[in-house]
Amino acid sequence: MDIADAIGFAAAVICSGAMLPQVIKIYRTKETRDLSLGAFAALGTGLLLWLVYGLLIYSAPVIFGNAVGLSLILYVVIMKLKQG
């Protein structure tokens, strides 16, 4: 792994990890009333496009970071749709 990939993976872990407190709070409280569905849907769409881009250029850090981030966002969106 070269330095560019190491930096990319570090960025992916930090950026994806930024969603963990929100996901944990939703998991514990089942409360999503104050969350904006539109904002999370837009973020999810952006992450999906970044994931596709990463697949097209064969970039492991881009693929990893956006796959993890998209998974977390999908959980939030699904819970928001279920809980309102």
Image (cartoon, helix red, strand yellow):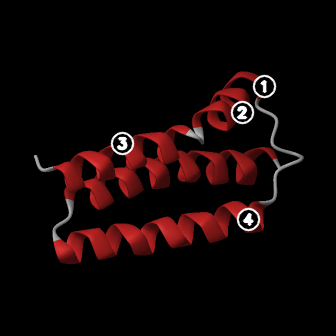
Residue that mark 1 sits on: 29
- The CA distance from mark 4 to mark 2 is 16 Å
For the residue labelled by badge 2, is the local secondary structure a helix, a strand or a loop? helix
From the image, state whether disc 3 or disc 4 is nearer to you: 3
Q: Tell whether label 4 touches label 3 (CB within 8 Å).
A: no
Residue that mark 2 sits on: 26
For the residue labelled by badge 1, is the local secondary structure a helix, a strand or a loop? helix
Residue drawn at (71%, 22%) of the image: 28
Task: Using the image, determine if residue 74 lies above or below residue 23.
Answer: below
Q: Residues within 10 Å of mark 2 (few under 14, many from 20)?
A: some
Q: Residues within 10 Å of mark 4 (few under 14, many from 20)?
A: few
- The CA distance from mark 3 to mark 2 is 25 Å
Lower sequence index among marks 3 and 1: 3
Residue that mark 3 sits on: 10
Whole-percent x, y for residue 11 in the image: 41, 48
Q: Tell whether label 1 touches label 3 (CB within 8 Å).
A: no
Amino acid on which the number 3 mark rests in the picture: Ala
For the residue labelled by badge 3, is the local secondary structure a helix, a strand or a loop? helix
From the image, state whether disc 4 or disc 2 is nearer to you: 4
- The CA distance from mark 3 to mark 4 is 25 Å
